[in-house]
Amino acid sequence: MTTWITICDTCKRDDWEAGDMALTDGERLAYLIEARAKDSVVKTRRTSCLMGCTHGCNVAIQATGKLAYTVGNFTPDETAADAIVTYAELHADSDSGQVPYRQWPQDIKGHFITRHQPLPEEP
């Protein structure tokens, strides 16, 4: 099963208008995650809005039959991209999608917004 990183490319942090507005913060983070995941076992995709606007720079980490997570409140930088991809790789390696806390990258701690149970299998 493939673990996907779904990146909201419309996210804007509160301070977005004070900087270079050529790209949204979500687009900046997406480029960084895509570059970091290029040679990874995880795949990336973009979406326009994960509806977590109060938690700018949102990402969903999900795979069929596994727990899914939404993480957010990231600064769009290399540190965040590395933590997100590293966590997604651990998710991919897990049978259930649950990664023991002691294995979490430091820079993803405190960024979890939601956890979703896997959908039941259809009969």
Image (tube, helix red, strand yellow):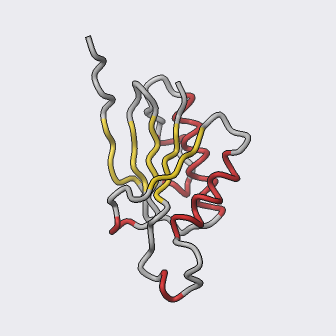
Q: In the image shown, does 88 or 26 lie closer to the viewer?
A: 26
Q: Is residue 75 above or below residue 3?
A: below
**Residue found at x 46% / y 43%:** 61
Q: Which residue sits furthest bottom?
A: 18
Q: Which residue sits furthest top?
A: 123
**Residue found at x 54% / y 47%:** 45
Image position, residue 60 (x, y; %):
44, 47
**Residue found at x 34% / y 61%:** 52
Q: Is residue 65 above or below residue 19?
A: above
Q: In the image shown, does 76 or 111 lie closer to the viewer?
A: 76
Q: In the image shown, does 34 or 67 lie closer to the viewer?
A: 34
**Residue found at x 45% / y 65%:** 10
Q: Quadrant of residue 116?
A: top left
How many marks overall? 0
Image position, residue 120 (x, y; %):
28, 22
Image position, residue 123 (x, y; %):
26, 10
Q: Is residue 68 left or right of residue 36?
A: left
